Image (spheres, rainbow, N blue to C red):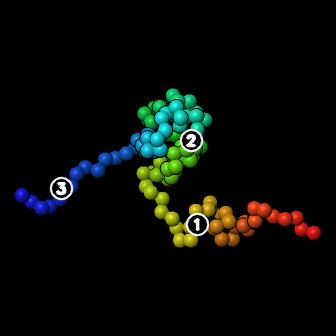
Amino acid sequence: MSMQPSVGTIPHFTIYDRLRKAREVSGLDQTELAERIGVSRTSVSSYEAGRIARPRKIVLNAWGLATGVPVQWLETGEEPTPGPGDDGAPAGGAGAGGGLPRLDSNQQPSD
């Protein structure tokens, strides 16, 4: 008996598989997700079954937001890697350095 670990098959997940997995892991059924992202339950089913050629970016963004899954993973299957100095702020925003200044949320009027 060999002690070598056997190499199995690595499954390939399509974007449609990832959409379904994201929904399932978030604990939403198709109807709940549809209500959250503003589409019909039939549309959610069609996305997950691959009957829609390519999900629109706005749908992917809403799907990611509703399920808590990064849009990059939904699109590519790759986990996003934060860059140096990435504080989670959108690119070009306050955390990107040289962007808009960060303002106090409770500003007082000046005299």
Q: Nearer the viewer, residue 109 or 87?
A: 109
Residue drawn at the location 43% of the way across and 55% of the way down: 78
**Residue at position x 49%, y 38% from top?**
28
Marks 1/3: CA distance?
40 Å
Question: What residue does disc 2 label?
Answer: 59
Measured in 3D between alpha carbons, the distance from the residue under mark 2 to the one under mark 1, in whole angstroms, is 25 Å
Instruction: Classify mark 3: helix, strand or loop.
Output: loop
Q: Residue 73 placed where, x, y %?
A: 46, 52
Residue linked to disc 3: 6
Viewer-closest of 14 and 61: 61
Rendered position, 48 above or below 83: above
Q: Is residue 105 left or right of residue 31?
A: right
Vertical relation: 65 (above or below) 107: above
Q: Nearer the viewer, residue 60 or 69?
A: 69
Q: Residue at x 68, y 66 (%)?
A: 94
- SS of the residue under disc 1: loop
Sequence-earlier tag: 3 or 2: 3
In the displayed orientation, state which residue is furthest to the top.
Answer: 42
Q: Which residue is mark 1?
A: 87
Q: Earlier in the sequence, mark 1 or mark 3?
A: 3
Say which mark, if any, is on residue 58: none
Describe the element under mark 2 as helix, strand or loop: helix
- Give x and y (percent) for residue 35: 58, 34
